[in-house]
Amino acid sequence: KKKDFKMRPILILLFSALIISSCSNTKNEQSDISFGKENTYENAPAKGFDMENSDPKAIELADKIMVAMGGRKAWDNTRHIAWTFFGARHLTWDKYTGDVRIESPRDSLTYLVNINTMKGKIAKNGIEITDTDQKEKLLKRGKSIWINDSYWLVMPFKLKDSGVTLTYAREDTTALGAKADVLELKFKNVGDTPQNKYEIFVTKDDQLVKQWAYFDKADDPKAAFVRPWGNYKKYGEILLSADRSDKGGPSKVKVDKELPASVYTEF
């Protein structure tokens, strides 16, 4: 739910006003979508989800999105996710343990951080940083990177997260003219930038997010950017959107059931 200010030149800066880019909706997408439609596994909200101020229509649509992307059980069973963010850095995330590896060639940094415990270590040019203050600062930076970069990849799975208020905004069309329901996401006491707001466009024919709009502040009258969220493919048991038509966000996505422990412990 955080915007990465270091990426502002790339984003025209999120998790910069841009011309709306086209969203992908290929035949391959459509054939991939159907695999999750029979999944009735309960999509319970996270503790702290703002049920009181979220409306039933929005919650129902969030559950349909989860099913279309493979279902809650498939998401819960997904463990290791790796991706590259805007070509600038590569992340590997263990959803079960909270361990994250971030390789950032631009500043020659490697982050090994657990986003739950905030324990870990940092290396620059392969040499571990031992200064306590610098290390703690960079560990926090590593978590902030993960918050931002993972949201660009797995946001549709996080619509009922802690601190989220989810409401139905309106019917609209995407940049490609597809009919869509628009959900509004606001945040409270969560993430690095809880003042943000998102609008996500869920196409009616397949219940998938195909476009999103980012507002730096919830009361901003105009979105800072509107971007496509397309090119869905099946990774493991779930659908993910990557390699999008605007060349932004996640690429080189990979999902693994198992990885060596050294991925998260060794530089």
Image (cartoon, rainbow, N blue to C red):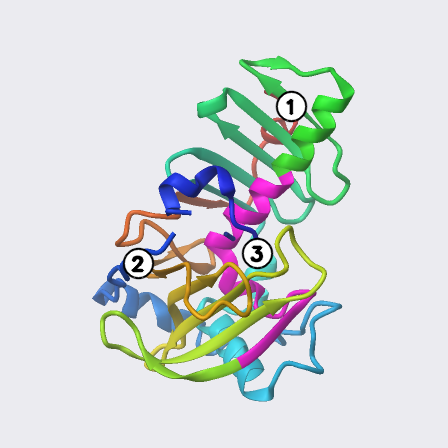
Identify the residue shown where x is 68% and y is 32%: 139
Q: Mark 2 points at which residue?
A: 231
How crowded is the residue under tag 2: few (<14 C-alpha within 10 Å), some, or many (20+)?
some
Q: Which of marks 2 and 1 is in front?
A: 1
- Position of the N terminus by quadrant: bottom right
Secondary structure under the numbered disc 3 in the rendered image:
loop
Task: Tell me where residue 97 appears, x and y as whole percent.
Answer: 69, 44
Mark number displayed over residue 1: 3
Of callouts 3 and 2, which one flags the residue occurring earlier in the amino acid sequence? 3
- Magenta range is 143-167
Location of residue 86 in the rendering, given as x and y in whole percent from the top left corner: 38, 41
**Residue nearer the viewer, 227 or 195:** 195
User: Helix, strand or loop at disc 2?
Assistant: loop
Sequence-wise, the earlier of marks 3 and 1 is 3
Amino acid type shown at disc 1: Ile
Residue lying at the far bottom in this picture: please name it. 56
* Magenta span contains residue 261: no
Main secondary structure type of the part rendered in magenta: helix
Can the viewer see residue 40 in this picture?
no
Amino acid type at mark 3: Lys
The answer to which of marks 2 and 1 sits earlier in the sequence is 1
Q: Name the residue under label 1.
A: 122
Question: Residue at horizontal 68%, vertical 36%?
Answer: 140
